[in-house]
Image (cartoon, rainbow, N blue to C red):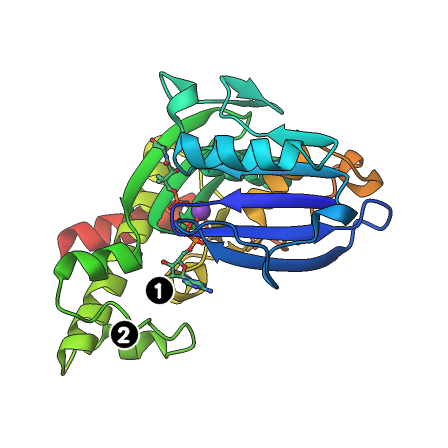
Amino acid sequence: MILDLDIGNTLSKWRLKDIASSEIRSRGAVWTREEWRPGPDIPDLDVVSAVRISSVARRAVLDNTVALLRRQVGAVHVARSMPEALGVSCGYREPGRLGVDRWMGALAGYQLTGGCCSVDCGSAITIDFVLPGGRHLGGYIIPGLRLMKESLKLGTRNVAIDPDSEADELLAPGRNTVEAVNHGIYMAAVSAVNRIYSEVCDREGVALPLLLTGGDARVVSRGIRVPHALWPDMVYAGLEASFPLTAAERAGRMSGAPRVPPPVSLEKIRAALAFSMLL
Ligand SMILES: Nc1ncnc2c1ncn2[C@@H]1O[C@H](COP(=O)(O)OP(=O)(O)O)[C@@H](O)[C@H]1O
Ligand SMILES: CC(C)(COP(=O)(O)O)[C@@H](O)C(=O)NCCC(=O)O
Ligand SMILES: [K+]
């Protein structure tokens, strides 16, 4: 089995993938802050022959995890942000400083679409752009939904936004503190994504496919006006592309890759942008 780890600042997600069939056998998540105690939510390492890790957690967390795994697993692959990989050139002046999750998303997104905007809605919401031809432009980082909520210190942090709530409900003015906070942070997030996407497509003169991933992607997706696709396993797909271990991966087929709707025309994006600037 292959153990894939996506270690974020909030949650450490894992999944077990069968090498022969390329099937995802099980998955789980543990809080990144906590020690990894053996338990139902930790994978059984005895069946694991290879591990692939994307980590943005503190260096110590990664080093401990790798040391623990290396004692029990033959091959441990640690992803790093690079100046260039799989046809993508990194837009950061210091490529090693780009979050590995963002780099994995850029690689997977480019492999699937040939150029895209990739949005990861996690502890932070990151928005990256890779142009057709593989030039990564760099991107944007804004606080994630939970961080925005906590920063308000209004004691509302444990009320998550229901991903299935009607989008227009979230547009309405809140009529109590929880609603006011949830509607406010939702509007902040979706307004930023819609505007950043439009501005960059306008500046670069190309309407890019839009991909969303991360724990809050479903909530944010409800407010994204332009056609887009949800890809929960997008960071994992970057690991598959970087360290292909199964026949399907070597054939460039990434697990859970969504059908990506064609973007609206550049003219429409520009018209909407101009209109929104008038308001
Ligand atoms: N099972 C879950 N437990 C806690 N938070 C979750 C869960 N599923 C989704 N979320 C939401 O997703 C966010 C974490 O998303 P994730 O992409 O895993 O973050 P990161 O990669 O930064 O650790 C949380 O802040 C929360 O809003
Ligand atoms: C911005 C991030 C914290 C987002 O991580 P996440 O929300 O997935 O936990 C992560 O990509 C990171 O640590 N980046 C390093 C700084 C940078 O990308 O510029
Ligand atoms: K993430």
> Circle 2 — which element?
helix
Residue 79 position within the rendered picture, expressed as x and y whole percent measured from the top left? 56, 29
Q: Residue drawn 14% across and 83% down?
A: 175
Q: Which mark is residue 42?
A: none
On the image, numbered disc 2 is attached to which residue?
170
User: What's the residue at 38%, 24% (across, down)?
Assistant: 97
Quarter of the picture for ligand 2? Answer: top left
User: Contact (CB < 8 A) between labels 2 and 1?
Assistant: yes
Side of 112 relative to 36 (left or right): right
Question: What amino acid type is highlighted by mark number 1?
Answer: Gly
Q: Is mark 1 within 8 Å of ligand 1?
A: no
- Rendering coords of residue 266 (x, y %): 41, 44
Q: Position of residue 259 (x, y in %)?
A: 63, 55
Is residue 221 or residue 177 the one in the foreground? 177
Q: Sort mark 2 into few (<14), some (14-19) or many (20+) by Cα contacts within 10 Å.
A: many
Which residue was labeled with disc 1? 223
Which residue extends farthest bottom? Answer: 175
- Please name the residue shown 64% across and 30% down the image: 77
Determine whether 22 is above or below 219 in the image: above
Horizontally, residue 228 falls left or right of residue 5, namely: left
Can see residue 114?
no
Q: Amino acid at mark 2?
A: Leu
Q: CA distance from mark 2 to mark 1?
A: 9 Å
The 10 Å Cα crowd at callout 1, few under 14, some 14 to 19, many 20 or more, is: many
Instruction: Give how far across and how far down residue 250 sits, in percent.
Output: 79, 34
Task: Determine if residue 84 is in view.
Answer: yes
Quarter of the view holding residue 68: top right
